[in-house]
Amino acid sequence: MSQKTAARIAVRDSLIYMVTVNRQFRDQVYDDKLLPVWVMKSPDEDKDDRALAAETSTKLIYSDQQNKQETARLPGIVGISKETLQTGVKLNEARENFKQAMSEFRKLYGDSIEAIEETSDEIREKMLGGLQFSHIHFVQSYRQLKLFETPPRRVGFSWAAHHSGSVKLSANEAIDHLRKKYLASSAIHKDIQILEQMPASETVIIKRILSPHLRANLTWAKDIELLRKADKDLRKRYPGQINTPLPVFVQLEKGQPLPEFNKIRAFDPSAKQERLPRSDTRLVKISENPHSRIYKYA
């Protein structure tokens, strides 16, 4: 058996298992109807909070009108049973195994844009098409659910709205960075073409503006707070802050309320406080393409 055949089988088997556990988790979340739930949904949404949480957190394929660069989001807090939490742990493991199988499969093709495009076509049309998963959203399929056996005392939601990531590289290094770190697209291809025409040692900045995202500060019971300060492993188990594109799932008993939390509203760009640009580090785009990510110092 060739390496590619073995890798292809690993992708298929890990996907089939993940889909099975994913469906089981969705059904169990829906069935925990006696436990409390809150999600941040639009006023015109007619689905109840629990059904929406179950559907969104297990959505593996693109919606008909979904932007290909965006992921399904639904912040909130969902009470679940012990059995559902255990299934959620299995689902996180299954998602990680599928992600690893995909990574190993892609490595066999290389990391150039052409190779990535070839791999994507191979996966979507030949492999996943037969399983009726040709429209799979890989990022949504890889996402790890936030599961807590012990509920935090409080969940404080807030918007992180003005963050950006940037890295300073030579033009030659930037080409390699774009090929390895970004999905193939026409914008990335055009940026690489521009970089290839520049002196290899010229300094450029690759800047990525992060869209507004929701995070939550978690406050734990006093005894946990004291222990986690001195134990690195406990800080992972009981984190102080997490990103929350999907609901936080907490194990509850019947009659037990949700942790204290703030019902945050949808992001309001008019409420964002703009930062003053630093005159000594102002960046300008190298390309006129509005989707370009490459800059240089003014």
Image (tube, rainbow, N blue to C red):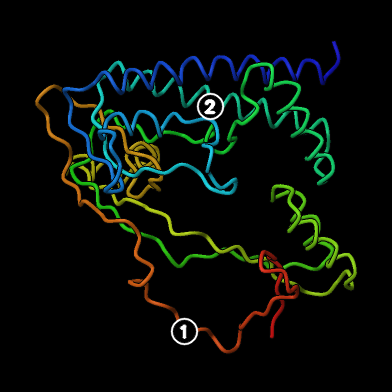
The mark that comes first in sequence, 2 or 1, is 2
Dot 1 crowding, Cα within 10 Å, few <14, some 14–19, many 20+: few
Image disc number at residue 95: 2
Distance between mark 2 and mark 1 Cα atoms: 41 Å
Residue 159, image quadrant: bottom left
Q: Quadrant of residue 237?
A: top left
Where's the C terminus, which quadrant?
bottom right
Answer few, some or many: residues within 10 Å of disc 2's Cα (few below 14, many 20 plus, some between 14 and 19).
many
At x 82%, y 30%, the residue is 108
Residue beneath disc 1:
276
Q: Which sits in the foreground, 7 or 16?
A: 16
Q: Is residue 174 left or right of residue 130?
A: right
Where residue 241 appears, x then y in whole percent? Answer: 35, 50
Near-viewer residue (213 or 177): 213
Residue 116 in the image: above or below residue 212: above
Callout 2: SS: helix
Q: Amino acid at mark 2?
A: Arg
The quadrant of the rendering that contains the N terminus is: top right
Residue pictured at 65% horizontal, 27% vertical:
134
Vertical relation: 183 (above or below) 110: below
Report helix, strand or loop for mark 1.
loop
